[in-house]
Amino acid sequence: MKENDVFSLPMELNDDLSFQTSQTAQTQPGLPQGPELVDLQQVTYFELARLMERASRRFSGLIRAELTKLRVDDIGPAQAMILLAIGDSELSVAELLDRGHYVGSNVSYYLKQLGDGDYIDRVASQRDKRSARIKLTEKGRQLRANLRDAAMTYERAVNRGDQDQRMLETAFQTLHQLELAWGSGPRYGV
């Protein structure tokens, strides 16, 4: 796939997406209806950014619901996302900031909550006592595993075959290119 091809979907995929989007809007309350439903042929980057923000909020709601099912009430979706970002690694705070879209002061607060809840261990660096390495505790690894299992359940419900997988990969590539472009724009005046 060429670099520019990421932004143009094959016509049959566009037709299928339009049909699926129309079908979804008709069957799910709360989704845009009528003129609010964006024609996929006329999607703008602004509309895409709005959709990503709404999808992110809905994903946070999904994580909140899973935390409730798991009877976890001492952390919220933002902290759970940090647990997922840490994974099996041992990271510095700077590395964690690079993995997500966090503001530094928020991460400090979230890490304090995760530490207080015994989800992470913070180990001071031997070279520089001001910096710390972060890793999940057993409790943190268990919650991460439970959240990943729940995510797989939702993924299986949405991803029904090869075409869905290709669409997911195309969406990921497109969003990654936008992330790079939007991230370098302010820096380089592009």
Image (spheres, rainbow, N blue to C red):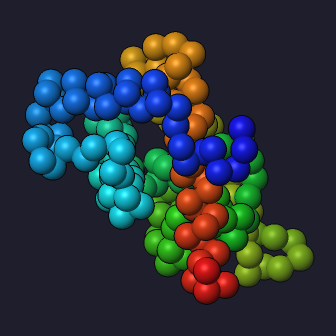
Residue at left 60%, top 45%? 6
Q: How many numbered marks are there? A: 0
Is 110 placed above or below 27 here?
below
Quarter where residue 22 is shown: top left
Between residues 40 and 27, which one lies in front from this camera angle? 40
Q: Is residue 60 visible?
A: no
Residue furthest to the top in view is: 161
The x and y percentages for residue 78 are 42, 55
Between residues 136 and 93, which one lies in front from this camera angle? 93
Q: Is residue 2 visible?
A: yes
The x and y percentages for residue 7 are 55, 48
The x and y percentages for residue 40 are 34, 42
Between residues 29 and 26, which one lies in front from this camera angle? 26
Residue at left 53%, top 43%? 8
Is 22 placed above or below 139 here?
above
Residue furthest to the right in view is: 127
If the image is split into quadrants, where does the C terminus sit?
bottom right
Residue at left 57%, top 38%? 170
If the image is split into quadrants, where does the N terminus sit?
top right
Residue at left 46%, top 47%? 80
Between residues 31 and 3, which one lies in front from this camera angle? 3
